[in-house]
Amino acid sequence: MKIIDAVQVHQTMNFNALIEALRDTFAKPAGMPQRQVFPLDSDENNHDAFAVLPSWNDKTIAVKAFTYFPDNPKKSTELASLYSKIMIFDRQTGVPQALVDGTSVTYWRTAAISALGSDYLARKDASTLLLLGTGKLASFMALAHASVRPITNIIVWGRSLDKAATTVELILQQRPDINVSVCEELKPAVQSADIISCATGSPTPLFNGDWVQPGTHTDFVGNHNHDRRECDSQLITKADVFVDSKINVFAEAGELLIPVEEGVFELSQVKGELAELCNAKVNGRENPQQITVFKTVGTALADLVGAQLVYQSI
């Protein structure tokens, strides 16, 4: 059995191959029970958690396990808030094949899933990307979207201008051909963007949904909690909504669950999930004026694809 660390994951991965592997896998039958997230403390102010995400297809069985301790960085600069491992087994024999660093795979597959959604839902001529968020995932998100659309302009918004500037530099290191800048004012940036991608820890909406213009594709990955959300109800009610996985999003995503509680949206209004886009059971973007939302909370099947791709490449 191979032990594959984060360095090997980053050296092996590329978005073109990963996005196509995800498209192919999601278009075919697979097993993916609802992921299980277990709170580790009864105190509502403590968000420590442990999660298990199983999945399988005709080649591989996978299970990702991760711990989430959001206060870790406050305890020590050497501690991360999330630790993750993915174990994969041969589907035909059950033989263990590899233990893969899950944190690095998660960065790649999260960004790739958003880009795959964008490939179905963003306008073909989308050229301006507004990226909200400056964490470790941010540069991956920008580079992934730029791999599926002719992005010439990326605007990075963050509460810390220093972190936003660092994110700009990380993107430019990989794509010096793109104009990348720090967002100075959010409203005009939202109004001018063709794609808006959000990967933050914000518990409340990042911008006014009324600012989003016809033809815009929006993407939300940062929230996994039923009582938090990165976008407001105005956006949800005026957009066509798609999700990565109904079974997980309908259990966890405040972006949809809060409008449901308000009585302004029903889960039955969701147009489809990623598998249905990939196997053409539902249509993606249907006209240039359509506003689209793609809400993701992450899926075990995407973890399987990432780990499988790295394993096969080493």
Image (cartoon, helix red, strand yellow):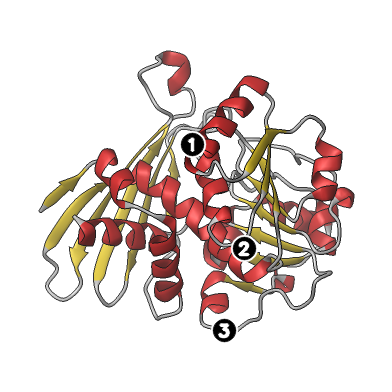
Residue 288: percent from left, percent from top: 80, 71
Q: Is residue 115 visible?
A: yes
Give the side of residue 34 with respect to residue 240, left or right.
left
Residue designated by label 2:
118
Disc 2 or 1, which lies upstream in sequence?
2
Residue designated by label 3:
280
Give the side of residue 98 with respect to residue 266, left or right.
left
Give the side of residue 289 with respect to residue 105, left or right.
right
Q: What's the residue type where badge 3 is placed? A: Ala
Q: CA distance from mark 2 to mark 3?
A: 15 Å
Looking at this view, is 176 or 276 the one in front? 176
What's the residue at 58%, 85% (across, down)?
281
Residue designated by label 1:
173
Q: What's the residue type where badge 2 is placed? A: Ser
Residue 307: percent from left, percent from top: 29, 56
Residue 284: percent from left, percent from top: 66, 75
What's the residue at 55%, 70% (across, down)?
274
Please tell me whether mark 2 sits on a helix, a strand or a loop. Answer: helix
What is the count of numbered marks? Answer: 3
Q: Can you tell which quarter of the image residue 76 is in?
A: top left
Please tell me whether mark 3 sits on a helix, a strand or a loop. Answer: loop
Please tell me whether mark 1 sits on a helix, a strand or a loop. Answer: helix
Residue 148: percent from left, percent from top: 56, 62
Looking at this view, is 191 or 284 the one in front? 191
> Which numbered circle lies on residue 102?
none
- Residues at discs 2 and 3 in contact (Cβ within 8 Å): no
Q: Quadrant of the C terminus?
A: bottom left
Q: Residues within 10 Å of mark 3 (few under 14, many from 20)?
A: few
Q: Nearer the viewer, mark 3 or mark 1?
A: 1
Q: CA distance from mark 3 to mark 1?
A: 36 Å
Q: Can you tell which quarter of the image residue 215 is in?
A: bottom right
